Amino acid sequence: MNLFYSLFALTASSGQYEASYTVIDEQLISEIADNNREALRAFYSATKKSLYSYVLSLCKEPESARDIMQETYLKVRACAHLYQPQGKPLAWLFTIAKNLFLMQLRKEKRAQPVAFQEIENSLSFSYETDAEDRLVLQEALKILKEEELQILLLHVVSGMKHHEIGDNLGLGTSTVLSKYHRALKKLRKHLESKGVSVS
C-alpha cells in the first residue's frame, strides 16, 4: 500500500520522504537529436514516472495517459534539435505533453471519462495490485483540481521534491507545499465521507 500510506502517513512527516526523482542530464537531449537510441532510452528511463504522473493528472485516464506519453517521446525524438538548454528539461517535456493533450481534447471536442484500467507493466506502481491504493487514486482523479493532482502525483508517485515540482511547473515552493497539503486534506475528507479509513 505504498501510494495509500504515502498520501496520508507522509502528511505529518513529509520532510522524511526520500525522493527517487532523477536529475536529467540535458546532454541526453542533444544526443537524441543526433539519433542516439541509447540516449533516448536513458531519457525515457529518467523521466517516465514523472511524465506519466503529469499526464495522468491532465487526462485522468491511464490508457490515454500512456498514449500521450508515447506521442510525447516520439515528439521528443523529432524535436530534440530544437531544445534550448535552460536547465529545465522536465519542464520542456511537460510542455510537449500538455500541448499534445490539448490537441487531443480539441480533436475530441470534449473529454470522455473511461473506466480505470490496468497500467503498463513498465510503470509498476502499488495501485496496480492494491485495491486501497487504486481507490485512493480513482478518487483523487475525480475530485482534485488539475494543479493539485499534478503536485500530488509528481510528489507521491514520481518522488519529486516540492521545490523540483515548483521549478518544473513554474510555481513557488510555498505554493506547491500549500496546494499539496490542501489536496491531501481534501482527499482525506472525501474518502472519510465515503467510509474509507485513512488513519
Image: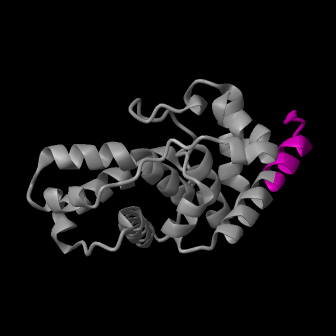
Q: Position of residue 127 (x, y in %)?
A: 60, 32
| Whole-percent x, y for residue 147 in the image | 63, 66
Left or right of residue 172, residue 96 in this image? left
Asked which quadrant contains residue 163, the reply is bottom right
Question: In the orientation shown, which residue stands out farthest toward the front?
Answer: 16
Q: Is residue 44 left or right of residue 90?
A: left
Residue 30 in the figure: left or right of residue 114:
left
Q: Is residue 135 visible?
A: no
Quadrant location, the N terminus: top right
Residue in view at x 63 percent, y 73 percent: 172
Evaluate whether residue 178 shows in this view.
yes
| Front residue of this view, candidates 73 and 8 | 8
The part of the image, by quadrant, that contains residue 25 is bottom left
Which quadrant does the C terminus fall into?
top right
User: Which residue is pictured at 62% across the width and 45% down the height?
Assistant: 156
Q: Can residue 196 be found in the magenta stretch?
A: yes
| Along the line of sight, the residue nearer the viewer: 27 or 191 | 27
The structure residue drawn at horizontal position 59% and vertical position 73%, both measured from the top left corner, is 171
Nearest the eye: 199 or 60? 199
Say above or below: 131 vs 194.
above
Residue 103 is situated, as x and y percent measured from the top left of the image, at 38, 71
| Residue 138 coordinates in the image, percent (x, y) | 66, 43
Identify the residue at image location x=19%, y=48%: 39
Q: Which residues are magenta?
A: 185-199
For the rendered model, the colour scheme is one colour
* 149 in magenta: no
Q: Farthest residue in the left direction?
A: 34
Furthest toward the top, the residue is 129
Tell me which corner region of the image, top left, top right, bottom left or bottom right, holds residue 144. bottom right
Tell me if residue 124 comes above or below residue 58 in the rendering. above
Q: Magenta part mainly helix, strand or loop?
A: helix
